[in-house]
Image (tube, rainbow, N blue to C red):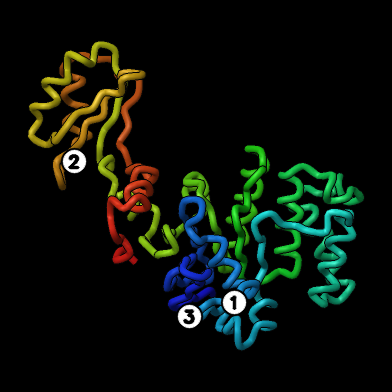
Amino acid sequence: MIETDQLTRCYGHLTAVDALSIRAEPGQVLGLLGPNGAGKSTAMRMIAGFLAPTSGTARVCGYDIRREPLKAKRALGYLPEGAPSYGELTVREFLQFIVRMRRLKPELGYRRIDEVVHLLQLDDVMEQCIDTLSKGLRRRVGLAQAILHDPPVLMLDEPTDGLDPNQKHAVRQLIDVMARERTILISTHLLEEVHALCNRVVIIARGKLLADATPAELEARSRYHGAVSFSAPGSGMSQEMLGRLPQVAAIEVDPLDGRITVFPKPGARILEPVETLLREQGLEVSEIQLERGRLDEVFRHITTGGEDHVGALA
C-alpha cells in the first residue's frame, strides 16, 4: 500500500507538489497522470525516500518513509525517470550489483536475475555495457532492477518510455500480472497507458490534486459520453432529421472525413433511435459507435483550469 498525507515540496517560492494526499491499495494500479512539469516525478521521489518533503508524510506498506526508511525501501521497487545509472557496467554486472545492494542471498538473487531477464527479454544483452543499449533496452534494465527483489509495492515512472509497440505490450502484460498481488503506482502523461493499465487515476497539475476517479468515471464527464458517431455515404441528408429526434442535443460533422457525431440530451440514450432513423432512410452505415467518453478531452479540461476540482469522485 502507498499513502501520502498532505505531501508537499517547495523550492523557494515554487511549490512543486502541493498538499498531495493519495492512497493506492494492494491489487490496484493507480495512475498518476498529469502534464509535463505537473510534479509527478517529484512526488514519486518523495515517496521513494530520495527527496525529503517540505511537509506532509508518505508511507509504504505502513512504514513512514522518514521514520522507517529502510523498511519502506525494502518493500518498494522503484523505476525512476531516466534509470538506470552505472552505464559502464554490463547488464549482468548491474543486476548483480543490485542483488548485493538489496542484500539478497546469492542463490535467491541469481535465480531472480534469471527470472526477470527472461521476463523482460534481456538474455541477448547481458554482457553489453548499459551505455551501449538503446533507450528501450535501458528502460527494460531499469524495470528489471525494480522488480528484482520481488517487492509488494512498485512505483514506475513512465515505464514504457522509449519502448516499441511490441515491447510496450509485453511490459503492460507483465504489469497486469504483477498487479494481482501488488500495489502499483504508475506516473505517466500517456492516456493510452491509463486505458491499458490503470483501474484508478489521480490527475495533478501545478502540483495540486485535481481528480481522483476510475477511468470510466472520468470518461463519463466527457461531453462525448453516450454520443453516437458514424460514417455513411449521403449522411448529410439525414442530419436535419437527426436533429429533430427529441433525445438529440447537437450534431457535429468532422470536416476531414465527414464522420457525424450525435450528442444526447442529459440522461438520454440515443443509439437505438439513431440506428432506427438511419435504417428508415436506407443509409449504408460503414461504422457506428457508442462513445464511452474521451479521456483526452477531460484531461485537457481539468488540467487547463476548465474545471477546478473533480476529486470528489473518489
Residue pictured at 18% horizontal, 38% vertical? 264
Residue pictured at 36% horizontal, 61% vertical? 210
Residue type (three-letter) at the residue carrying disc 2: Arg
Question: 255 or 231: which is nearer to us?
Answer: 255
Q: Which mark is residue 191?
A: none
- Where's residue 186, x and y in %? 55, 59
CA distance separating discs 1 and 3: 10 Å
**Above or below, comparing residue 127 to residue 261 in the picture:** below
Residue pictured at 35% horizontal, 43% vertical? 297
- SS at badge 3: strand
Question: Outermost residue, front direction?
Answer: 12
Say which residue label 1 marks: 52
- SS at badge 1: loop
User: Where is residue 276, by image quadrant?
Assistant: top left
Say which residue label 2 marks: 269
- SS at badge 2: loop
Q: Disc 2 or 1, which lies upstream in sequence?
A: 1
Quadrant where the N terminus sits is bottom right
Horizontal arrangement in the rendering, residue 10 relative to residue 306 (left or right): right
Q: Are marks 1 and 3 in contact (CB under 8 Å)?
A: no
CA distance separating discs 2 and 1: 51 Å
**Above or below, comparing residue 213 to residue 256 in the picture:** below
Quadrant where the C terminus sits is bottom left
- Where's residue 37, x and y in %? 51, 55
Q: Is disc 2 surrounded by few (<14), some (14 to 19) or many (20+) residues within 10 Å? A: some
Q: Is disc 1 surrounded by few (<14), some (14 to 19) or many (20+) residues within 10 Å? A: some
Question: 38 or 23: which is nearer to us?
Answer: 38
Q: Is disc 3 surrounded by few (<14), some (14 to 19) or many (20+) residues within 10 Å? A: some
Say which residue label 3 marks: 56
Residue type (three-letter) at the residue carrying disc 3: Gly
- Where's residue 261, x and y in %? 26, 29
